[in-house]
Structures are given as structure tokens and as C-alpha cells.
Amino acid sequence: MPKEGNEKKKCCHCRGMPSHRHAIPRCSDKITSIPECKDKPIKVTDDVCDAIRTTVQKILGGTGDLDEDVPQLHSDEGICFFAIDFHGDPLEINGFDSSSPLSTYALGSSELAPTHDDPCKKANVNLFEVMMPDQPNFKDNLSQGQYYVKFLAEEGIPSSISHFHWWGMNPFMAAIHSQNVGMDPVLFFKKIATALKKVGLVIGPSEE
């Protein structure tokens, strides 16, 4: 048994392994109290989610495929998450009709996320992905997907990637991911919904 006071000291990033020979701050040197982040919002609220839902329905239509329960808070993590089925019909994949949400749904989310280094410094992280038919020469010599991406870019929302999900799709569907950090989530999804409507993706009679 080691003598009292001679125990090897641990370091935080070693995850319980003994300290290396070179100087490394020990846990006792690094641990600080977790800040309370007073007077700052902690997470996306139900009111924000409801406002996103109302905005999306107003532009894209409030009947049919926008489920009564979405957008909604996802568990207790404060993430507003929703799904929209624009197409209604199954997607043919290698000759088989798929009705999976992975093949037909558009997905969106918003969260009030902390920075990696400072839990009190937060910003709205808004994400959206849609699969849409990429009709050639949809408008202004741009395909349907190109026109959608161009419109969003002009609205300050870049598309991080455009690709396809499944081999053997009929019709061909472009999967387009868009993102923004810092924009008000209701404004973000208003711009997204407007872009979707401009390329003909709606879910029912709209109020606009």
C-alpha cells in the first residue's frame, strides 16, 4: 500500500490515468463552478415552436401533411423539431414504393445552443433539410434545386450541401441542407417556407 500523501495525482484529460511526467494541470487546478447564466434564455420555448408552426402553416398551407403535433419540443432538451411530408406519395426506390420518413419528409430544427467553450454564450442554431424533385430549367435557366438554393443564399441562408440520398430513386430527388447560426428561428423558417413555396412545394391551401 502506498504511504499516505504519496498517491499518484490524476489529471482531468487523462480520464483517471496518472499524470504524465511533463507539467499538466490537475483537475483541482481546472475545475470551476458552473455559471448560472442569469437573465439569459436557457432553451427554445414552446412559444417559439408554436410561432414557427404558425408561420410555416401560413405560407405552405395548414391542412394535410403538417401533423397536429409538430413543430414540437423534442423531449426536454429544448430542441424544436418538425417534419413535413410535401409529396404524400411513396418514393420509388429501385422499383419499390417507400413511405419511410427517410425517403419523403423534410426535417427542420432550432435550438438555443451553447458554444463549446462557454455554456453561457448561446445562439440559435437553425437547420433544415428537404428532398425535392430537381426539375431541369425550372426558372431563369436554373433547375428547381438551384433556384431554391439561390433564393435562400440571397436571404442570408447558405446551403451546406446538395446531394442525393438513395440509389434508384424515381423521380430523382435532390437532398438540400440549409443552416444558419444566430438568426431568429421564426424568421429563418419564414425564409425557408417562402423558398419552398417559390419552387412549388406546399402542403395545402395557404393564407398568403
Image (cartoon, helix red, strand yellow):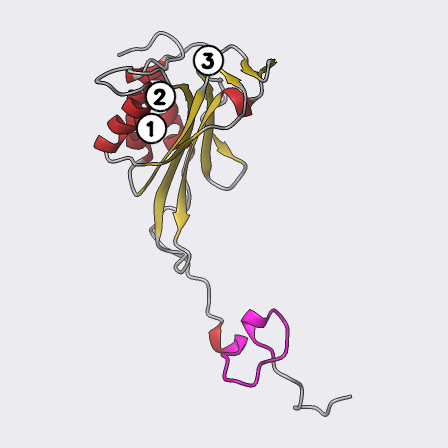
Which of the numbered marks, if any, corresponds to residue 35? none
183 versus 21 height, above or below = above
Magenta stretch, main secondary structure class = loop
> Earlier along the polypeptide chain: callout 2 or callout 1?
2
In front of the other: 20 or 189? 20
139 versus 149 height, above or below = above
Which of the numbered marks, if any, corresponds to residue 56? 2
Residue at mark 2 to residue at mark 3: CA–CA distance: 16 Å
Q: Seen in the image, is 129 located left or right of residue 141?
A: right
Residue at mark 2 to residue at mark 1: CA–CA distance: 7 Å
Tell me the quadrant of the picture where the C terminus can be found. Answer: top left
In front of the other: 155 or 113? 155
Any magenta on residue 23?
Answer: yes
* Callout in the foreground (2, 3): 3
149 versus 117 height, above or below = above
* Position in image of residue 175 (x %, y %): 43, 27
Tell me where the magenta segment starts and ends, as one range: 10-28
* Callout in the foreground (3, 1): 3
Query: Which residue is denoted by mark 1 in the rendering?
Result: 189
* Position in image of residue 46 (x %, y %): 42, 32
Kindly check if marks 3 and 1 are in contact, taking CB atoms under 8 A apart as contact: no
* Image-quadrant location for residue 80: top left
Label 2 sits on what residue type? Val
Instruction: Identify the residue at image location x=48%, y=74%.
Output: 30
In front of the other: 173 or 9? 173
Label 3 sits on what residue type? His
Tell me the element at label 2.
helix
* Position in image of residue 144 (x %, y %): 32, 19
Residue found farthest to the top: 205
Tell me the quadrant of the picture where the N terminus can be found. Answer: bottom right
Kindly check if marks 2 and 1 are in contact, taking CB atoms under 8 A apart as contact: yes
Query: Which residue is denoted by mark 3 in the rendering?
Result: 87
